[in-house]
Amino acid sequence: MDYHTKTRLILPFKGTWLVSNGGRDPEKNSHIRVDGPANQQFGYDFRQKRKGTEKTLIDFEVFGKDVIVPGDGVIVQVIDGSIDVEFGERDRSVGVGNAIIIDHKNGEYSLLCHFKHQSIQVKAGDTVKQRDVLGLCGNTGNTSEPHIHFSLQDGPFMHRSRALPAQFHKILVDGKWKTNYEPERGQMVSNR
């Protein structure tokens, strides 16, 4: 899909994180599946590299870290109340876990998922600015370890919106500056 993101997106976190899912190749992005949700085709998962000693959620560096607004907009949906599952468990009954949808007022909507239990700091109708804190990274829903899922879509409904490619305006990728870039699995990324 040849699409250029209208919103000047930043990554939805502070510091440097690993892209654990991202890119347009199914080998690099497990969101690309024939039977997968249409609104997640270009989705990203961001986390930290594992040390190999993680046993509980607090052992993961990103657990409880700030999740920030990727682009100005209005909160149109908040799903809250999902409880963090332990490392290695998944709650498929609440796939997105605690989640937020932001309307960027240009036909683009950001979906952010897997927030920590009782950490979301916004409500539907709130106007938010880029870099505002939305909540904390958690392990709610269909997730194997603490991370944040981010995807861009063309409407407010997760079940029927179409996925849009999300290019981040200016980010540091493996130590090099990239503009209007779609990161891929394995890259270390941060905002400027």
Image: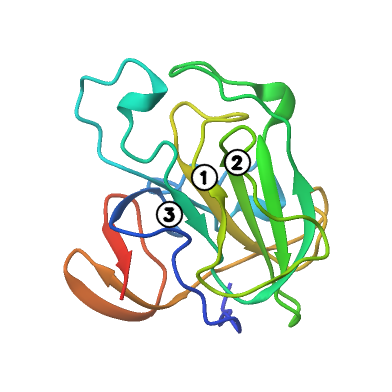
How packed is label 2: few (under 14 Cα within 10 Å), some, or many (20 or more)? some
Residue positioned 59% across, 30% down in the render:
140
Q: Which residue is at the front of the view, 29 or 72? A: 72
Which residue type does callout 3 highlight? Gly
Rendered location of residue 9, percent (x, y): 51, 75
Q: Position of residue 177 (x, y in %)?
A: 24, 78
On screen, residue 13 above or below 47: below
| Residue denoted by label 1 | 136
Left or right relative to 165: residue 174 = left
C-alpha span from label 3 to label 1: 21 Å
Q: Residue at x 68, y 32 (%)?
A: 95
Q: Which residue is mark 2?
A: 119
Answer with mark 2 or mark 3, whichever residue precedes in sequence: 3
Cα gap from disc 2 to disc 3, whole angstroms: 25 Å
Query: Counting residues from the N terminus, which is met first, the one under dot 2 or under dot 1?
Result: 2
Counting from the top left corner in percent of width and height, residue 141 is at 63, 29
Q: Residues within 10 Å of mark 1 (few under 14, many from 20)?
A: many
The amino acid marked with disc number 1 is Leu
Drawn side of residue 82 relative to residue 130, left or right: right
Q: Is residue 136 visible?
A: yes
Residue occupying the point 63% across, 77% down: 72
Specify the label residue 101 is tagged with: none
Closer mark to the observer between disc 3 and disc 1? 1
Q: Is residue 96 visible?
A: no
Name the residue beneath numbered marker 3: 22
Q: Which one is in front in this view, the residue at disc 2 or the one at disc 3?
A: 2
* Residue kind at label 2, given as amino acid type: Ser
Q: How is the image coloured?
A: rainbow
The part of the image, by quadrant, that contains residue 126 is bottom right
Question: Does the CB distance between marks 2 and 1 fall below 8 Å?
Answer: yes
Q: Position of residue 57 (x, y in %)?
A: 41, 24
